[in-house]
Image: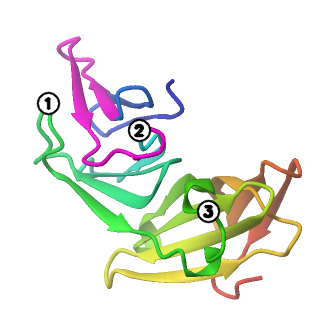
Amino acid sequence: QVWDLDIDNKGNIWFTDEKQNALWRFSNDTGSFEMFTVPERSEAFGTTYPVSMEIDKNGSNIYFVGIRSPSIWIGNTSQMRNGTAEGIERIGIPLDSFKGIDPDLVSTGSIALDEDNDRLFISLLAFNTKGQILGYNLKNNTFTTYEMPDDITSPVGLTLDLNDNLWVTDHGTSIFYRLDPASGD
């Protein structure tokens, strides 16, 4: 299953591949495909289930998350090699707030890149149980946790507006809301 796609600054089309636990790149110039494997597999599900990705403006890095992996993956596109996991780094996501919940039920939903502020946002959830948004500072490698109200338990979709507000969809309630990263409101 393909869940997401993005286009880099050279016009290459990147997309996720759940079954093969990989990302693909299609070159418009050559008409060829390259596959890059995720360097981890979920023991319970057999795939990390890559679901959401963002490519930076200069095409140097691709950031992605998988439903079945509490991780951020960063691929350095100049170091990535076809058919391998080379050039892809894993950053573990802290799950402290999800203690007492079966780890196999904790999922990432989406990722959003805020290049102006050197950070990523990641939605994290245990469907219909708990939801959370994490900010990851790309400069100092630290996380900021944004706790959601008790009725927001399944945040999945993320996008940023022109004022650096994060907009989030909640799969379990069919609502969307705005998160101000500066205040946490």
Q: Is residue 131 above or below residue 99?
A: above
* Residue on which the image places disc 2: 47
**Stretch of the chain drawn in magenta:** 22-45
Of badges 3 and 1, nearer the viewer stands: 3
Real-space Cα separation, disc 2 to disc 1, in angstroms: 19 Å
Quarter placement of the C terminus: bottom right
* Residue on which the image places disc 1: 82
Real-space Cα separation, disc 3 to disc 2, in angstroms: 18 Å
Decide if residue 12 is in sight here. Answer: no
In the displayed structure image, the side of residue 128 where residue 67 appears, left or right: left
Magenta stretch: residue 43 in it? Answer: yes
Image location (x, y in percent) of residue 89: 23, 59
Instruction: State the residue in front, 129 or 79.
Output: 129
Q: Give the residue type at disc 2.
A: Thr
Q: Give the residue type at disc 3.
A: Asp
* Residue on which the image places disc 3: 102
Instruction: State the residue in front, 145 or 116.
Output: 145
Real-space Cα separation, disc 3 to disc 1, in angstroms: 35 Å
Image location (x, y in percent) of residue 169: 76, 53
Among the 4 quarters of the image, the one containing residue 101: bottom right
